[in-house]
Image (cartoon, rainbow, N blue to C red):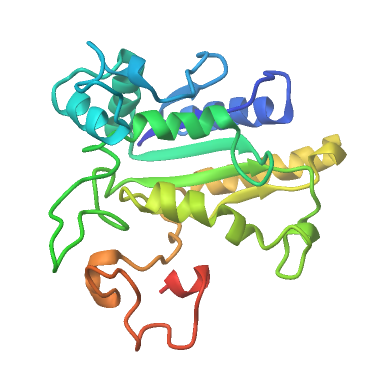
Amino acid sequence: MNLLIVYAHPEAQSLNGALKDFTVSHLQAAGHQVQVSDLYAMQWKAQFDADDIVGGPQGQRFDASRDSQYAYANGLQSADIAAEQDKLRWADTVIFQFPLWWFSMPAIMKGWFDRVYAYGFGYGVGEHSDTRWGDRYGEGTLAGKRAMLVVTTGGWESHYSARGINGPIDDILFPIQHGMLFYPGFAVLPPLVIYRTSRMDAQRYASVQQELAERLDGLATAAPIPYRAQNRGDYLIPALTLKDEVAAGQSGFAAHLG
């Protein structure tokens, strides 16, 4: 299996660094091919702007969607963007590893999505009509591939529980898992979340490492999160709201689970 790790942490000698190195060695020992996009080590440019279009924007001003579409269709993307898209095409499974900073991923990883998910690659794919609203949410360029988050946080697990002060972890990660991974077609595996990272001793690290190994060994077989696919009958098109008889009486993120 071809595996890509998109990794965002600024310190190699950190818990995240150790877990990333373990992931690479464990996967390679199992016979998999592994590539790593270490965003801080790559000095990845986070902002998407006119400098990402070879030859500059097409109009008198930069238009993010229009210029992204033109650059992608005409081979005029900056080289670093095109290289990451090639890695995604190559990969069967992608692991996104990052610390939870202010209830989301570090800005450098958000910038990876902003730049790599070009119009025509990550979005704007497929027919848009009164009967079909594009190839997305279960379809798209990355359909047939799997993705999983490996997330660390200093908070306790109880802080992210159903009644915890920070809100349920599944809700916090929903915009990433549903909106940034399922949207372009990934089958999204349940995340591995490692809590209370400042209280990590050798015994607990061994336990975390074992849990990570088990998750890595199951990447090809684990059941993905059962998000509802957009074009398979649950949603009204083009309104893109759930039909009345689907998840009746439910609202919010949970309604989009089948």
173 with respect to 102 (left or right): left
Q: Position of residue 217 (x, y in %)?
A: 50, 45
Instruction: Give the vertical position of 19 relative to 131 (above or below).
Output: above
Q: Residue at x 43, y 59 (%)?
A: 224
Is residue 14 left or right of 172 when viewed as pictured? Answer: right
Name the residue furthest top.
Answer: 55
Number of labels in the image equals 0
Q: In the rendered image of this protein, does residue 178 appear above or below residue 61?
A: below
Residue in front for this viewpoint, 3 or 233 = 233
Image position, residue 86 (x, y; %): 28, 25
Which residue corresponds to the image point at 48% horizontal and 52% vertical from the top-left? 177
Picture quadrant of residue 71: top left
Give residue 100's quadrant in the image. top right
- Examine the rendering and report whether any part of residue 257 can be seen: no
**Is residue 26 or residue 143 the one in the foreground?**
143
Q: Is residue 258 left or right of residue 99?
A: left
Q: Nearer the viewer, residue 208 or 239?
A: 239
Camera-side residue of 26 and 48: 48
**What x and y, as percent, mark residue 40?**
57, 18
Q: Does residue 38 appear anywhere in the picture?
A: yes
Residue 169 position (above or below residue 16): below
Residue appearing at x 18%, y 27% in the figure: 70
Extreme residue in the front direction? 60
The part of the image, by quadrant, that contains residue 258 is bottom left
Q: In which quadrant will I find the N terminus?
A: top left
On the image, the x and y values in percent for residue 82 come to 28, 21
